[in-house]
């Protein structure tokens, strides 16, 4: 996680890694608004929300490579012992009323994706 947080590496989802034949330590090449950039893969994670896959970058690095002040998704890593459902409820309350926000735990997202099949 330290390499992700300092912007020296990225995390990629299993579908992204599989489609591109990537493993930990490999380099992922991205087309950014400031030109092509490459960054090492520090880890691969399960993702049930996208069959195409995703790349997770430090926000500061993302801001340097893209001119996009907003965000469309957010991942939270919950401390051991904290109930994920309680964290989800707290995030929803913090967002406030009137926000179009979908918050799911990884367990909830996995369960929803398995219902499709």
Image (cartoon, rainbow, N blue to C red):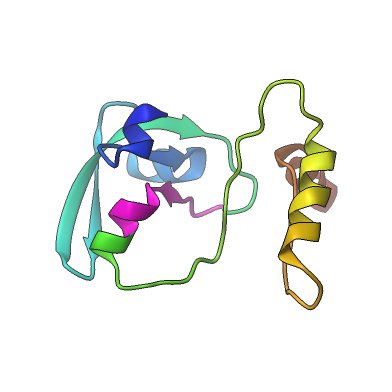
- Above or below residue 112? Residue 73 is below
The residue closer to the viewer here, 77 or 14, is: 77
Given the current orientation, which residue lies at the most extreme left position?
A: 35
> What residue is shown at x 74% (from left), y 43% (from top)?
105
Given the current orientation, which residue lies at the most extreme bottom position?
A: 98
Query: Magenta stretch containing residue 52, yes or no?
Result: yes
> What residue is shown at x 58% (from left), y 36% (from top)?
46
> What residue is shown at x 72% (from left), y 64% (from top)?
95
Instruction: Indicate the position of residue 42 as horizontal and vertical percent values.
Output: 34, 30
14 left or right, relative to 6: right
Residue 26 in sight from this viewpoint: yes
Instruction: Indicate the position of residue 17 as horizontal and vertical percent values.
Output: 40, 39
Which quadrant: the N terminus? top left
61 left or right, relative to 79: left
Q: Which residues are magenta?
A: 51-62
Instruction: Indicate the position of residue 56 as horizontal and vertical percent values.
Output: 43, 47
- Above or below residue 56? Residue 36 is below
The residue closer to the viewer here, 54 or 114, is: 54
Given the current orientation, which residue lies at the most extreme top position?
A: 81
Query: How many numbered badges does the structure rendering display?
Result: 0
Instruction: Indicate the position of residue 81 as horizontal and vertical percent values.
Output: 76, 21
- Above or below residue 107? Residue 65 is below
The residue closer to the viewer here, 33 or 85, is: 85
98 left or right, relative to 73: right
The residue closer to the viewer here, 62 or 50, is: 62
> What residue is shown at x 15% (from left), y 60% (from top)?
36
Residue 117 in sight from this viewpoint: no
- Above or below residue 74? Residue 17 is above
Query: Magenta stretch containing residue 76, yes or no?
Result: no
């Amino acid at each position: 996680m330290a390499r992700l947080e300092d912007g020296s590496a990225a995390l990629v989802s299993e579908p992204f890694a599989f489609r591109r034949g990537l493993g930990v330590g490999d380099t992922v090449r991205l087309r950014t608004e400031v030109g092509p950039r490459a960054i090492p893969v520090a880890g691969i994670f399960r993702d049930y929300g996208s069959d195409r896959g995703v790349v997770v970058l430090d926000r500061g690095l993302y801001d340097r490579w893209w001119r996009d002040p907003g965000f469309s998704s957010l991942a939270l890593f919950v401390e051991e012992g904290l109930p994920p459902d309680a964290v989800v409820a707290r995030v929803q309350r913090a967002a406030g009323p009137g926000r179009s926000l979908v918050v799911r735990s990884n367990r909830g997202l996995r369960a929803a994706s398995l219902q499709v099949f």
